[in-house]
Image (cartoon, rainbow, N blue to C red):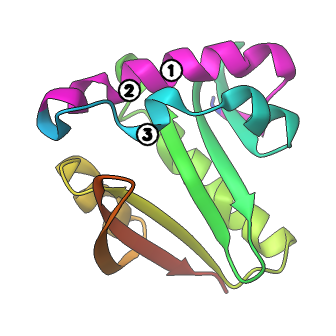
C-alpha cells in the first residue's frame, strides 16, 4: 500500500535519483535534460515542499508542491519507472488536492514539456485542463490547472 508523507532531509538524494530515472527517457526527445533532473531537492525538502510516496518502506516517487497566493503549484512529480502504473502518481495527485484544500487554495497548476506526450494524456485523465502553451527557460511547456472544490 502506497502512503505519502513529507520528505525527510536525508531523502533529498533519493528524490534526485528518482527524478533522473524517471526523466532520463525524455532527454533524446527534448534534446537536453528536463528541468526536474537538475532541481534542488535539498531546498525543496528543507522548505517543506517535497512529499514522498512510500511502499514497503521504500521511496518510490515524489511530488514538489509550492503554495502560491492563488494556487498550489505542482512543480514536479516523478515515480520510479519500475513502479509506474501502480497508483503512486495518482496517490501523489490526490495529496496535492488535499494540500490545496488544507491551504484553502482554489486550484492546482502544473506544467510539463510538450515532448512528454504521456503527460499530455495523463493529467487530463486526472481532471486537469490545458490552459496554454509557451516557451519558458528554453523549454516548450504545456500548462494545466485543476479547480479544487
* 66 on left or right of 24: right
In this rendering, the answer to whether 76 lies above or below 39 is below
* 15 on left or right of 145: right
In space, the residues marked 2 and 3 are separated at their CA atoms by: 12 Å
Residue 32 position within the rendered picture, expressed as x and y whole percent measured from the top left: 25, 31
- Tell me the quarter of the picture where residue 3 sits: top right
Q: Earlier in the sequence, mark 2 or mark 3?
A: 2
Please say whether residue 14 is one of the residues in the magenta stretch.
yes
Main SS of the magenta part reads: helix
Which residue is label 1 attached to? 18
| Residue 35, numbered label | 3
3 or 1: mark nearer the eye: 3
Residue 119 is at least partly visible in this image:
yes
Q: Quarter holding the N terminus?
A: top right
Please say whether residue 7 is one of the residues in the magenta stretch.
yes
Q: Quarter holding the C terminus?
A: bottom right
Q: Which residue occupies 42% across, 62% down? A: 111
Specify the segment rendered in magenta: 3-28
Q: Which residue occupies 23% across, 60% down? A: 121
In this rendering, the answer to whether 117 lies above or below 109 is above
| Residue 22, numbered label | 2
Residue 52 position within the rendered picture, expressed as x and y whole percent measured from the top left: 69, 32
Total label count? Answer: 3
Circle 1 — which element?
A: helix
Circle 3 — which element?
A: helix
Amino acid at each position: 500500500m502506497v502512503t505519502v508523507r513529507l520528505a525527510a532531509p536525508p531523502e533529498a538524494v533519493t528524490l534526485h535519483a528518482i527524478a533522473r530515472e524517471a526523466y532520463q527517457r525524455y532527454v533524446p526527445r527534448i534534446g537536453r535534460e528536463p528541468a526536474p533532473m537538475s532541481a534542488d531537492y535539498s531546498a525543496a525538502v528543507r522548505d517543506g515542499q517535497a512529499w514522498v510516496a512510500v511502499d514497503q518502506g521504500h521511496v518510490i516517487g515524489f511530488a514538489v508542491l509550492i503554495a502560491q497566493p492563488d494556487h498550489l503549484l505542482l512543480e514536479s512529480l516523478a515515480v520510479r519507472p519500475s513502479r509506474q502504473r501502480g497508483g503512486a502518481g495518482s496517490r501523489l495527485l490526490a495529496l496535492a488536492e488535499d494540500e490545496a484544500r488544507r491551504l484553502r487554495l482554489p486550484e492546482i497548476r502544473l506544467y510539463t514539456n510538450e515532448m512528454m506526450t504521456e503527460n499530455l494524456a495523463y493529467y487530463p485523465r486526472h481532471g486537469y485542463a490545458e490552459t496554454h502553451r509557451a516557451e519558458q527557460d528554453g523549454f516548450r511547456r504545456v500548462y494545466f490547472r485543476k479547480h479544487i472544490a
